Image (tube, helix red, strand yellow):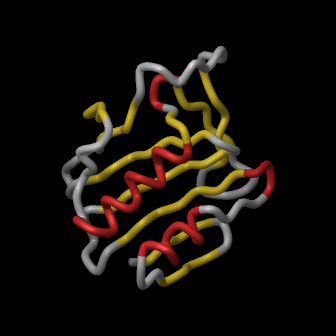
Amino acid sequence: MTVYSFNGKEECKNISELLNALKQRSKGNSNDFELRTEQEYPFLSILVKGDLACVHFFENESDCGHYAFTNDNNLNEDYIVFNMGSKDFETEISKDLVIPVEQAYIIAEDFYEKKEMSKKVNWFKL
């Protein structure tokens, strides 16, 4: 699996290498990951800031995607700021679409193994 991030491109040959890649952080304790298989679709996007994440799954070209969500993240702010695309570009994500980073790692492991949307979390279809 290929992982793209602020740090460049990394080929991951097993789950351990994938998790190591996903734990890399840059400015602001953040990163923006894109997990790609040999095919163009599906793919997984993970924004990370500290111990929080936003996970977006794309099934195919015509799919606007699905966001992982949780009903109990206990965040006080309505929006969480993540770096997206570059270390210097910020975007606000609704707290409803923000999950613990450990949950994002589980989603990534499932994607690595099955090349599909994880069944271990709730998804919001756009």
Task: Locate the C terminus and report the quarter of the image it occupies.
Answer: top left
Q: Identify the image quadrant of residue 125.
A: top left
Please provide percent x and percent y for residue 23: 63, 62
Instruction: Looking at the picture, tell me which residue is in the foreground, 113 or 61.
Output: 113
In percent of the image, x 44 and y 77: which residue is there?
Answer: 2
Please provide percent x and percent y for residue 42: 26, 62
In percent of the image, x 30 and y 31: which residue is there?
Answer: 124
With 64 as the anchor, is 54 left or right in this view? Answer: right
Q: Identify the image quadrant of residue 119.
A: top left
In percent of the image, x 50 and y 41: which residue is there?
Answer: 54
Instruction: Tell me: residue 4, above or below residue 125.
Output: below
In percent of the image, x 59 and y 70: which residue is there?
Answer: 20
Instruction: Tell me: residue 1, above or below residue 111.
Output: below
Please provide percent x and percent y for residue 100: 54, 38
Please provide percent x and percent y for residue 111: 31, 61
Instruction: Tell me: residue 46, above or below residue 39.
Output: above
With 58 as the anchor, is 49 left or right in this view? Answer: right
Can I make out residue 61 in this image?
no
- Total labels drawn: 0
**Extreme residue toward the right, this view:** 27
Q: Identify the image quadrant of residue 77.
A: top right
With 28 as the anchor, is 41 left or right in this view? Answer: left
Instruction: Looking at the picture, tell me which residue is in the foreground, 118 or 49.
Output: 118
Instruction: Tell me: residue 2, above or below residue 69.
Output: below
Can I make out residue 17 in this image?
yes
Instruction: Looking at the picture, tell me which residue is in the foreground, 90 or 11.
Output: 11
Task: Locate the N terminus and report the quarter of the image it occupies.
Answer: bottom left
